[in-house]
Image: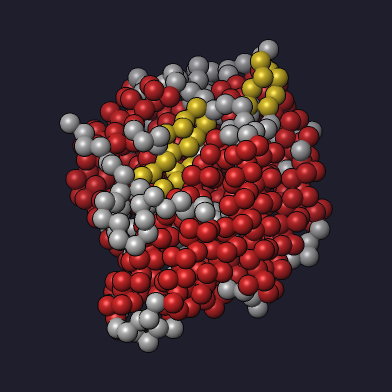
Amino acid sequence: MTTLLTAYPTDISFAPADLHGADWSAVQPLYDQLLNRKLKCKGCLEQLLLDRSELDAAVNEAGATLYIEMTRHTDDEDIKKAYLSFVEEIVPKLKDISFQLDRHIAQCPFADDLDQDRYGVLLRDLESDVKLFREENIPLEVEDTKLGQQYSEICGAMTVQFDGEEKTLPQMGPYMQVVDRKVRQSAFETITERRLQDADKLDEIFSQMVTVRNTIADNAGHEDFRSWSFQAKHRFDYTPATCESFHRGVRENCVPIMHTSNRLRAEAMKVDLLRPWDLDVDPLGRDPLKPFAGADELVNRTSRLFHRVDPSLGGLFDTMREGDSLDLESRKGKAPGGYQYDRDRRRLPFIFMNAAGLMRDVDTMVHEAGHAFHSMLSRDEPLVNYRHPPIEFAEVASMSMELIAHPYLDEYLSQEDADRARRTHLEGVISSLCWIATIDAFQHWLYTHPHHTQDQREIYWLELHAIYGPDVSWEGLDTARAKLWHRQLHLFEVPFYYIEYGIAQLGALQMWLMYREDPARAIDHYRTAMSLGGSKPLPALFDAAGLQFDFSPVMIARLMAEVEDELSRLPV
């Protein structure tokens, strides 16, 4: 019998259980109490950290709830108004008082007396944030968030008429797997036409974002927004040069494998040149994989898969059937993409996605469940900061699950179709590493060339896509190719957040190899490391999982050799 993961906690001591975290009149007095509290000893400081964590969790969850509802209903004006009210009215005040608290803690004479093994990461991050904070950046960061909301709203409103029905763009996904090439081409062109209708708006939004972000960096005394972002994202364990080394490793080891796969695909399809609409269809003309029909079936089959991976993980997954923890199906007015969001006060995860009945929806479900496992395994951590691990490791939790799930895909498919899915996923790992290198290299250029024009931006994007992109003909589609980056939400809403996926993917591949050799050992390492949340530096978190924190060309070459070997055993 599954034990439901109930809302947390029952021992509220500082922030009242009924506190409304989006009501500043209720929240501010509590922050003021913390700020004015006299710290007379190390124990006083530790209690302050715990009380602050409790209060931050309440406010975080209020913001999370508003964001979740906004993405579920981008066409609801009242919901949008409530979210923007939080962004415009609460977030600036929260940033200001959080800075004051950070400074109060970082400058406390008892900070050095704390157990550095326990509090070292927290204090390091606080000290960095204090140095970075500028009051004049608060309204700029709010403006950046609002511009991101405009991007989400524009994308969420995109629908097309196709096959006699109005469809969201995620709902057009299945047509890209239809055997009839003319149908795929028509679907691709329909989607592209719709996206290009709003291309000028998105370009203008992004140009505004670049200006805002450059100003933020200037205000903080940084050379450029890249430098500012590395400090803001607490990237203490790697540098821009390390990222450039990753780009080189991908270019040397992943791109050739992807191009070989492209060539084999073209041969199987008996075409001289692949087109963009040829990459998702089965190369032998078999019908698209249909792993599930509807959200309920997706949940049921995924539950069985996780129980086979490890019964304890299966039990954790089953707890998400309750507590409004899943919103899975695509619909008009729903924002694109997928995510897992922590609700910090209750310590309950939430999964959002746009399922359309495709195999990639299974990958998304398993991926976001990995994030939820991370959240649930670290939920007993008292400090909310530590319940949010660095993205470079958070994505190991999710990407590992995608790969570990391979032996159990027969929960959705026949054995023959499961082999197809495994091959597709591994080829997708390679192409995703190429895409990650493209997006990361693009961001490095964008913000180290702060005064670039829109034309220069597109020229550089096309150069990168030619280096890292698939071996596909874009003849007659120059404008569509130049705007491909518009599809990447991270560029708009969370700048410089993307290399993390590449770092994590290399960790996940290591976890996959460990699981193939010794499943029990791998799951034990997984659970141990995920329970740490973000309480250790990145290299230590990777080490706890039995992994190397290494994304050099040498590591990439070693892992790609393993992927190539596995692909050689899987039928086309």
Q: Residue at x 35, y 72 (%)?
A: 48
Residue 142 % position (x, y) = 64, 58
Q: Is residue 224 visible?
A: no
In front of the other: 274 or 485: 485
Specify whether 417 is left or right of 208. left
Quarter containing the N terminus: top left
Q: Is residue 425 left or right of residue 184?
A: left
Q: How many numbered marks are there?
A: 0
Query: Which of the pair 115/35 is nearer the observer?
Result: 35
> Which residue occupies the foreground of this view, 235 or 101?
101
Left or right: 90 with respect to 530? right
In the image, residue 41 sits, relative to residue 232, either above or below, namely below
Rendered residue at 50%/64% (across/down): 28
Farthest residue, direction bottom: 109
Residue 208: x percent and y percent? 75, 56
Residue visible at 42% across and 21% down in the picture: 292
Q: Quadrant of residue 540?
A: bottom left
Q: Quadrant of the C terminus?
A: top left
Does any portion of residue 453 appear in the rendered image?
yes
In x, y percent, where is residue 225? Answer: 65, 67
- Percent coordinates x, y for residue 108 in the rendering: 40, 83
Query: What is the basis of the colouring in this image?
Result: secondary structure
Picture residue at 32% right of the left edge, 40% below the top:
404
Apparent side of residue 546 relative to residue 567 in the rendered image (left or right): left
